[in-house]
Amino acid sequence: MTLYLDHAATTPVRAAVIERMTEVMKHHGANPASSHGPGRDAAAVVDRAAAEVAACIGACGDEIVWTSGATEAINLALKGVCGFHGGGHVISVVTEHSATLDTLDWLERGGVAVTRLAVDRDGLLDLAALAAALRADTRCVSVMHVNNETGVMQDLAAIGALCAEHGVTLHVDAAQSLGKQRIDVDAQHIGLLSMSAHKLGGPPGAGALYVRARPRIGLAAQIHGGGQQGNRRSGTLAVQQIAGFGAACALLHTEGAALPQRLRRLNDRLWQGLAPIEGIVRNSPADGAAHILNVSVPGVHGAALLTGLNEGQPPLAVSSGATCSAARAESSHVLRAMGRRPALAAASVRLSLGADTTADTVDRAAQRMVAEVSRLRRLAPRRNAIPA
């Protein structure tokens, strides 16, 4: 049986979510934009989900715009703000997800000015550098709350306060933090916030963008054709997917701090289990997001390690950081930005935990990784350790 520790890529759909989605598909199959009774019933399902998602971030249901996932939400946020203002200047961070970085590249080719700020060895943004980068035409600052590769958490309260002081919209990529870290859009001065259902036990293909209503954030639509969702994102809503997203958020909202606390204990246990690996480097901060542990293993080939873990017995489902970076056969841009040498960045493994992770899974995963590293090092005994 596969030991699944790749929840940062996709978390399996939770049982209560499947139940909600099944109920909706059986009894609420109408178009929620229709004015008849079944349509109104479907719209009520959507409204319930909006309230459940909004409750996780301290927002109102009418501030939720449904998307196909966080990638679309990020595109809508960044392109939407710049489109509304006719261009301008955007500030972001070099360690962002490719959904943000690629969107910024696209905007830059279209004439938008983009500043990409560096991070320190801990992966943190320098607030003084952010303040210095702000300009009169800065329309948006875009920051990932929890880094998807390392679990590094940016200080949203401080960043939000700085943006508010200068009248600049703060967009937050919350794909990895929703339901796992405290988010309060008012207290943290967040104007736009991108979310994804499949990172927290909801269905793939469902996401949302929080758009502040008061004061209203101007946003140019990127998908046209029906005028749904106040003309911000056209298209018939996938009611069952949206219901599943809401159910996943409701579960996490009910669990409160219990899940993050349990994940922290499991994260610490996993790190202790990997301690026998000589020279192992911890890339995730001890106070980072509890569900992500990123490590680099000197003296082994990164691709060989990942293949051995994924295909060995029992199979250990982990990744080499961001799934999109792996698809491009690139070493981690996040770790390189944090000062890791390219070879060490290429020998990184991300182990990520979820609601269904048990202590037994963590222990067996650690044993598998220790054994696999030992096997690979025996095959290449003369390979030198790689300094951090």
Image: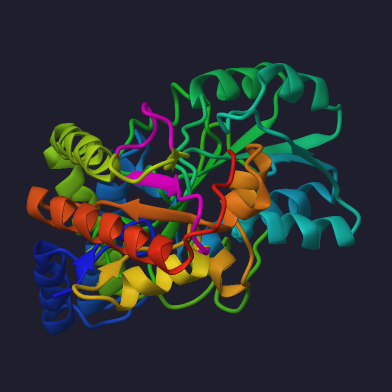
Q: Residue at x 39, y 64 (%)?
A: 378
Across and down, in percent, residue 19 comes to 9, 70
Q: Is residue 254 left or right of residue 55?
A: left
Across and down, in percent, residue 291 comes to 30, 44
Asked if residue 76 is positioned above or below residue 89 in the image, the reply reads: below
Q: Is residue 146 left or right of residue 221?
A: left
- Which of 349/85 is in front? 349
Is-magenta flag for residue 346?
no
Look at the image and tell me whether residue 32 can be seen: no
Main secondary structure of the magenta stretch: loop
In the image, the segment drawn in magenta is 284-301
Give the quarter of the image for residue 17: bottom left
- The quadrant the C terminus occupies is top right
Asked if residue 271 is positioned above or below residue 67 in the image, the reply reads: above
Across and down, in percent, residue 310 comes to 33, 73
Residue at the farthest right position: 111
- Which of 206/13 is in front? 13
Indicate how the structure is coloured in the image.
rainbow
Is-magenta flag for residue 289?
yes
Q: Residue at x 33, y 58 (%)?
A: 374
